[in-house]
Amino acid sequence: EESTLAAAFTPDGGSSWTQVEMAMLYTGPLILNAAPIKTDINGSPRFLLPAHRNTLAADPRGSRDHFILSSTSLLEWRLEAFIPQPTSARVFLHEGNIAKGDTEDELKIVMRTADYDQTNLTTSPPQAYSSVSTDGGHTWSASKPETSLHNAKAKGYFGKSATGSHIYVYNDGPAQGDTAPGFPNGGRTSLRYKTKPAGGVWGKEQTLYHAGIKNSYPTLHEVTPGDYRCVWDSGTATKPRTHIHFGKLRITP
């Protein structure tokens, strides 16, 4: 993997962009999938950026790690923490999203998963994994399965609404290259979601978008409490990523 962190600045709301040089105190490849979040570590304001690496794909001495970068300025980034593996069998943890947890002082990351050694396989059963931090993101708990949150090797979205509810958006069904009843062309088709009210449990599966075509990699932005704008890559019934789709979603507490 040859990858570096890049950034740009816009002074006009996104009409034009200028590249920004950054200082990297983390050395190594990285793959990003989510926006930075603001937090405090030991009373110091920080930005946290979830990232992962998969050097094991090309190097037998490599690794598959999920980690957290931190910055005080968005211009200089350092390694803040690794997300610990589960206490049982290892899992390929990647493409995580960080949001406020169940309490005000808790952060939670929910991650896409695959089998650690055979990444063409999902976990068994296919499910997301999570980890929590109670010190602003400096240390994290051992990862554990989110038994109510399906994940078959596909990027999901996890966040917390201003209403207090958590939301998880994901692809149902099998992995992209696998067929199953109702999925003759493989997974990454329908986009489903679940919500969890403050102090509650994850609710039933609901549909964000279904049209018999490929859809994946959802990203959401909350514009008012409970009201989201959504973007994801879309395709045809058999070919992924031919165009971009946008949508709206409203959730209730």
Image (tube, helix red, strand yellow):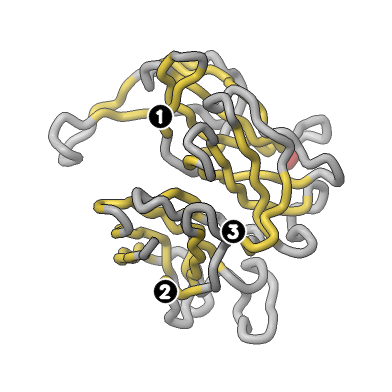
Q: Residues within 10 Å of mark 3 (few under 14, many from 20)?
A: many
The N terminus, quarter of image: top right
The residue tagged 1 is 38
Secondary element under disc 1, as helix, strand or loop, is strand
- The residue drawn where x is 50% and y is 19% is 41
In front: label 3 or label 1: 1
Please name the residue shown 35% across and 63% down the image: 244
> Percent from the top left, x then y, of residue 239?
50, 72
Name which residue type carries label 1.
Lys
Q: Are marks 2 and 3 in contact (CB under 8 Å)?
A: no
In the rendered image, the quadrant that contains the C terminus is bottom left
Q: Nearer the viewer, residue 242 or 149?
A: 149
**Disc sitting over residue 200 in the figure:** none
The residue to which callout 2 is attached is: 209
- Rounded to the nearest angstrom, the CA distance separating label 3 from label 1 is 26 Å
Q: Are marks 2 and 1 in contact (CB under 8 Å)?
A: no
- Identify residue type, mark 3: Ala
Q: Does dot 2 land on a helix, a strand or a loop?
A: strand
Is 228 positioned to the left or the right of 203 in the image?
left
**Residue 139 spot, x, y in % from top left:** 64, 25
Q: Residue furthest left?
A: 12
**Label whose residue precedes the other's in the sequence (3 or 1):** 1
Q: Position of residue 212 (x, y in %)?
A: 47, 82
Task: For label 2, count other residues whose C-alpha is less than 10 Å away and answer few (under 14), some (14-19) or many (20+).
Answer: some
User: Between residues 160 and 65, which one lies in front from this camera angle?
Assistant: 160
Considering the numbered disc 3 on the image, is that residue within a helix, a strand or a loop? loop
Q: Quadrant of residue 44?
A: top left
Q: What mark, if any, has residue 154 been given in the picture?
A: 3
Q: Is residue 199 above or below residue 140?
A: below
- In the current view of this chain or complex, which residue is farthest to the front? 199
